[in-house]
Amino acid sequence: MGASGPAEFIEALRAQSQRYHSHHAFHVKMNEGRLSRRQIQGWVANRFYYQKNLPLKDAAIISNCPEPAVRRRWIQRILDQDGTAEGEGGIEAWLRLGEAVGLTREELWDERHVVPGVRFAVDAYVNFARTRPWIEAVAASLTELFAPDLMATRLAAFERYYPWIDPAGLAYFRARLTQAPRDAEHALDVVVKFCRTAEQQAKAVAALAFKCDVLWSMLDAIERAYPDSE
Amino acid sequence: MGASGPAEFIEALRAQSQRYHSHHAFHVKMNEGRLSRRQIQGWVANRFYYQKNLPLKDAAIISNCPEPAVRRRWIQRILDQDGTAEGEGGIEAWLRLGEAVGLTREELWDERHVVPGVRFAVDAYVNFARTRPWIEAVAASLTELFAPDLMATRLAAFERYYPWIDPAGLAYFRARLTQAPRDAEHALDVVVKFCRTAEQQAKAVAALAFKCDVLWSMLDAIERAYPDSE
């Protein structure tokens, strides 16, 4: 079986959006304003474990990538997430979100709320980036193709349904509205450029499916840990 | 056995300078102006394999490091070596050195001159950074404590003994005169801060000894591949 043309390959990647966690019941409920304060806190604290591991994941991709031009662009993700100074960056923005929903920085950093299923899923993603070919880890990042829609919906939902959260705490989501499309566009260019054979393209699609599983599995674990009844 | 105080620990690290490759016969000959054009070319081409792997090594350290403040500072090394745009950075400077000694960029990138002993030593260093605790890989970088003296000697030697090399090609060494002390100072602060127990300190010293072996072993292999008689 031959390789697909770029358009078909991109379509196969975009088709993974049906597995994106925006369709998960917990996310649907979040965006319909039906989560309790405790459920929101549980989601924020567990999702922080994902956030704080992103620079390790992105550094693993750079560590495995022999292409200076790709590294030179990919490093922007680490700069965005860690910031270039104390008090800046995506991790800091997520800590402020935590404070806005009533959590301390300490309880976000010390992982006391992180449930095993979230830890396993996030660690699987970091290990994927460390051990698999760098281009597959780049393909796994392509969930960002689907992120801006979710971010826009989430921002509107939070401001409408959860007025107890200070809107200043939502800065992370606002930043991702512009960062995610920019990052996804670059990652897509790289994946299309380096995945030429049918086998490479199949592995890229599989990597993206794997990443959708990571995000979905996180919400499964969070949903179970923070049920409606409480 | 208890941990050493910072001063003793730093002294134990600095004592590794006696194992630094500045004492290797090939380096001594280089700085005495006794290397042939072919020997200089062989050294530049093989050392390029080390240079091009440095961002992968530094990204591995970042990928294993849970300390945002350390990552935020360490990323500067990748920015220095890869540059922030095409045509900048340490790798580019080394390619220009290659051109100044009569090698093409292509023959530097394609590794045709890289001898097995150099490959094994450099790969061992990258694997060390990928697989060992991040603080040990930071300690391994402390050969930079010893580098500025060598760089200053080398710059003077190249300008005096190898006038056939365009001095513009020596920009990499000039940049390292200021970068290496700055990087080494930060790495030393981090190692002293995070290596508190006797066991941690012993592992840091061992990591630095390992790194001295990497650099020494590279020169052994280069010396054998480019003997005087040729």
Image (cartoon, coloured by chain):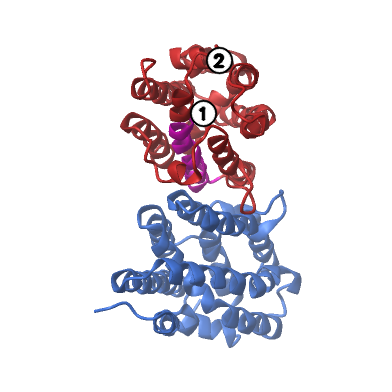
Chain colours: A red, B blue
Q: Decide if residue B161 is in sight here.
A: yes
How crowded is the residue under tag 2: few (<14 C-alpha within 10 Å), some, or many (20+)? many
Q: CA distance from mark 1 to mark 2?
A: 27 Å
User: Residue sitting at 38 percent across and 20 percent down?
Assistant: A223
Q: Residue furthest bottom?
A: B32
Q: Residue at the location (33% across, 29% down)?
A: A117
Q: Reply yes or no: does residue A122 show up in magenta.
A: no
Residue A174 placed where, x, y %? 67, 29
Place of residue A92 in the rendered image (x, y in percent of width and height, measured from the top left): 58, 44
Report the amino acid beneath label 1.
Ala
Q: Which of the image's four quarters has the C terminus of chain A?
A: top left
Q: Nearer the viewer, mark 1 or mark 2?
A: 2
Q: Quadrant of residue B182?
A: bottom right
Q: Which residue is mark 1?
A: A139
- Looking at the image, is B56 positioned above or below residue A136? below
**B171 in relation to A158, above or below:** below
Left or right relative to A2: residue A228: left
At label 2, the amino acid type is: Asn
Q: Residue at x 45, y 79 (%)?
A: B20
- Give, as a single range, the part of the protein colored magenta: A44-66
> What mark, if any, has residue A31 been given in the picture?
2
Residue A122 versus residue A94: which sits nearer the camera? A94
Query: In the figure, B157 relative to B120: above or below?
Result: below
Quarter of the image with the N terminus of chain A in it: top left
Can you give x and y, in whole percent of width and height, for residue B96 in the image?
A: 69, 62
